[in-house]
Image (cartoon, rainbow, N blue to C red):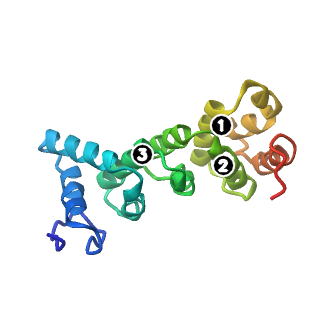
Amino acid sequence: MKKIDNHEIDINLDDFPDNLVKLIVGLLDDKNYPEKHNARITLVKMGKPIIPQMHKLLASRNGLLRKDVAKIIELIADRRSIPLLISLLDDMESDIRWIAAEGLIKIGRQCILPILKSIRDGKSSYFHNKGTHHVLNSLLYENEKKKLTPLLLSLDDYHELGETAPVEAFKALKTVFKCNT
């Protein structure tokens, strides 16, 4: 079953186990919702061991597949997905951006430093900043939010497109989180 001529899957599945290939194909079946739903549930139950294969599938140009895979990654909430979810905050599809932000929130506070570092290092766009604002607003404690008000305002200000966000993220890493890197 490894050889699939399904034009909807544009990722080479040759190195995927047969049971995983069958579930991935099931994710794409919009005409059979129970099969699609069961495939998603089964993949989520498989948990962290399938995360590397799910990451590979996000390279697909198929928006439906990418959205379903992003949802599975969100539900598994594995810290190895943090860099990938941060990059998905800039995805061309709004559903995937939202799923990525929710996935980071589910993973928890261990996402804060990588997100701040991505902002500090210049990863800044309108969508990325909005997603980052949502994540930080959900994960930061109230006292941290007060200290990071300039950063949060910068991320939320579409007129400036977050031009001051890298500087504010640098300050946050140094002062609030005492991070030297």
Where does label 3 land, which residue?
76
Identity of the amino acid at label 1?
Leu
Q: How many marks?
A: 3
Q: CA distance from mark 2 to mark 1?
A: 8 Å
162 or 71, which is in the foreground?
A: 71
According to the picture, the residue beneath numbered tag 2 turns out to be 115
Furthest-top residue in this view? 142
What's under tag 2, amino acid-wise?
A: Ile
Q: Tell me which numbered mark, 3 or 2, is placed earlier along the sequence.
A: 3
Is disc 1 placed on a helix, strand or loop?
helix
Q: Which mark is residue 136?
A: 1
Rendered view: 97 above or below 84: above
Residue located 28% across and 68% down the image? 16
The CA span between labels 3 and 1 is 20 Å
Q: Of helix, strand and loop, which one carries label 2?
A: helix
Q: Is residue 177 left or right of residue 17?
A: right
Q: For this view, does 168 lie left or right of residue 42?
A: right
